[in-house]
Amino acid sequence: MIFRRSSWALLLALLVAGGLATACAKNPETTPAVESTGPGVGTGGQFVWHELITDDVVASRHFYGELLGWEFEQTSRRGKPYSLALVGDRYVGGIVGVDRRPSEESIAQWVSYMLVTEIDQATGAIERGGGRVLVGPVSLGTDTWAALVVDSQGAPLGLLQTPEDLSAVVEGTIPNGGFLWRDYLAQDVEAALTFYADFAGFQRGREQGSSNYPHYVLKEGRGGAGLMPIEDAPVESNWLPYVRVDDAAALAGRVRDLGGEVLLAPSSEIRDGSLAIVADPSGAALALVEWTQ
């Protein structure tokens, strides 16, 4: 598991001291940043999908259904069960099950998918930058391809190539229960900035937070991302996704009863109490954040 629960006390101390207090601005559309420069792989840095990898699909569906009001449509992907999560008539994410032995540590986590123009070129760029391709590219039909990779610091990242117009995903209204942002938690800030500048055209944007623990805006907008340093925390580099909610404190109060864990409770010191970080029953972490469009 990327987020080891015993490690969160130190990590949260770093986040409170710096980036997370200002991460995911009240309105990401107005957060100053330097836009993507459009690299050769053609990603542009837009995140368009989020997928939960879990060893307990049943518990995960119950947790997110009760907590966020998600409904589910059962389908399959490459012959294996796949759960599509919906808010109203809008797809917001997917859940895929993985097997593990009782003696193994859970690998449950949320994976954020970045849109790419040519997936073979993109996976090649990942490898040239020091990352690895774990799965794929695999065909999802209708000229749509996906791959699961890790970057140079071992952080999982999904890649998606599709002819579909996904502008509504990153430009349309984000419903409560929908993903709107993600922050990269970096063990090596300079290495991460270099890697994603080369791969996705991200450039170091405006720094927020304290001078010791800044928050970098890599790309503005609701398909964009930020970066925070975690050099002193025993937690692996990672992408942390944010879900829009209307009352973070109320939802955090329900997490334990649903089998999850509150990793960061809402506090007046962090975004006026509008942010919580939680783990679902299988240990996958995500942030709940109130946001005014």
Image (cartoon, rainbow, N blue to C red):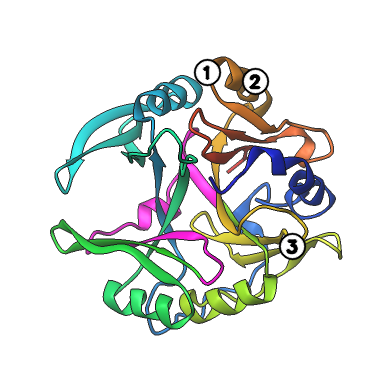
Front position in the image: 9 or 25? 9
Numbered disc 3: secondary structure = loop
Q: Which residue sits furthest top? A: 257
Residue ID at (57%, 56%): 238
Number of other residues with Cα within 10 Å of mark 1, as a class: few under 14, some 14 to 19, many 20 or more: some
Pointer 3 or 2: first along the chain: 3
Residue 250 disc label: 2
Q: Which is closer to the viewer, label 3 or label 2?
A: 3
Residue ID at (24%, 59%): 164
Q: Split into 4 quadrants, where in the image is the C terminus?
A: top right
- Image height check: is 228 above or below 81? below
Image location (x, y in percent) of residue 241:
54, 47
Amino acid marked by disc 3: Glu
Amino acid marked by disc 1: Leu
- Image height check: is 128 above or below 118? below
Q: Which is closer to the viewer, label 2 or label 1?
A: 1
Residue segment shown in magenta: 152-181
Tell me the quarter of the picture where residue 250 sits.
top right
Q: Is residue 91 visible?
A: yes
The residues bearing labels 3 and 2 have C-alpha atoms spaced at a distance of 32 Å
Pointer 2 or 1: first along the chain: 2
The residues bearing labels 3 and 1 have C-alpha atoms spaced at a distance of 32 Å
**Is 195 positioned to the left or the right of 230 in the image?**
left
Residue 258 disc label: 1
